[in-house]
Image (cartoon, rainbow, N blue to C red):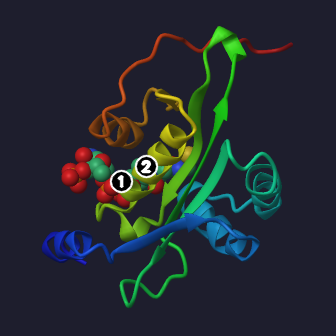
Amino acid sequence: MNAVTRRAAESSGNLVNIRAAVEADLGSVATIDERVTGLGKLDYWRDVYERYSTRRTKQRFFLVAEPVGDASEKPLLGYIVGAVRAWEFGSEPCGWVFAFSVDPDTRLQGVGEHLFHAMSGKFKATGINTMRTMVARDNNLHMAFFRSEGMTAGPYIQLEKELD
Ligand SMILES: CC(C)(COP(=O)(O)OP(=O)(O)OC[C@H]1O[C@@H](n2cnc3c(N)ncnc32)[C@H](O)[C@@H]1OP(=O)(O)O)[C@@H](O)C(=O)NCCC(=O)NCCS
């Protein structure tokens, strides 16, 4: 799909449908993850599903993007997972995004933005007004995407130490 088709599809609202993940999505989620990271981790995704889609679901969100109509032959185009976390590190409640990927064949067509906006809406509906994520310093793609969505450096820094 080229940029013109994409804009047309978006304006008519029929590019992707963002919905809550169901158990039957986990294979497709693991496949996208494997294409992006080289590791499929189906057990990990089962565990994420169990923790983020079946418990405390007013604060935990596992969303998937499915193509609408004949936009793609793939069952899913991407996913995003996040949760509202309260008072950790002295922080007021805020929304954390900790897993996010779009199928490499469907990049730069607005799917990531749809997922990000859907997650922002879920977080806002809980009453919070800040969302956070963490990116590797040298990951220019993540940085470009999140900057384009209005995210900037937050008030915390990450500290770590190698354990002997
Ligand atoms: C980051 C990611 C989710 C973006 O998804 P996407 O559907 O391609 O993004 P969109 O098409 O919605 O792009 C939105 C904006 O982000 C920015 N952007 C996205 N990809 C970009 C790229 N390759 N270079 C520069 N800017 C980029 C652009 O500003 C873009 O807006 P524009 O198209 O109007 O210029 C996707 O690239 C991805 O899944 N990356 C791998 C993630 C990963 O490593 N996950 C595993 C660990 S969490």
Q: At which x and y percent is residue 52?
A: 74, 50
Q: Label 2, on which residue? A: 116
**Eyeballing the image, is 17 above or below 138?**
below
- Tag 2 near tag 1, CB within 8 Å: yes
Q: Is the residue at mark 1 in contact range of ligand 1, meaning its CB lies under 8 Å from it?
A: yes
Q: Which of the 4 quarters of the picture holds residue 46?
A: bottom right
Q: Under tag 1, what secondary structure?
A: helix
Q: Label 1, on which residue? A: 113
Q: Under tag 2, what secondary structure?
A: helix
Residue at the image point whose x is 35% and y is 24% from the top? 152
Q: At which x and y percent is residue 10?
A: 25, 69
Residue at the image point whose x is 75% and y is 58% from the top? 45
Q: Which of the 4 quarters of the picture holds residue 26?
A: bottom right
For badge 1, the amino acid type reads Glu
60 left or right of 43 in image: left
143 left or right of 94 in image: left
C-alpha separation, residue under disc 2 versus residue under disc 1: 5 Å
- Classed neighbour count for the residue bearing mark 1: other residues with Cα under 10 Å, few (<14), some (14–19), many (≥20): some
**What is the number of the mark on residue 144?**
none
**Can the viewer see residue 160?**
no
Residue at the image point whose x is 83% and y is 14% from the top? 163
Q: Is the residue at mark 2 in contact range of ligand 1, meaning its CB lies under 8 Å from it?
A: yes
**Can the viewer see residue 57?**
yes
Position of the C terminus, as image quadrant, is top right
Q: At which x and y percent is residue 31?
A: 63, 70
Of 131 and 78, nearer the camera is 131
- Classed neighbour count for the residue bearing mark 2: other residues with Cα under 10 Å, few (<14), some (14–19), many (≥20): many
Of 130 and 159, nearer the camera is 130
24 left or right of 124 in image: right
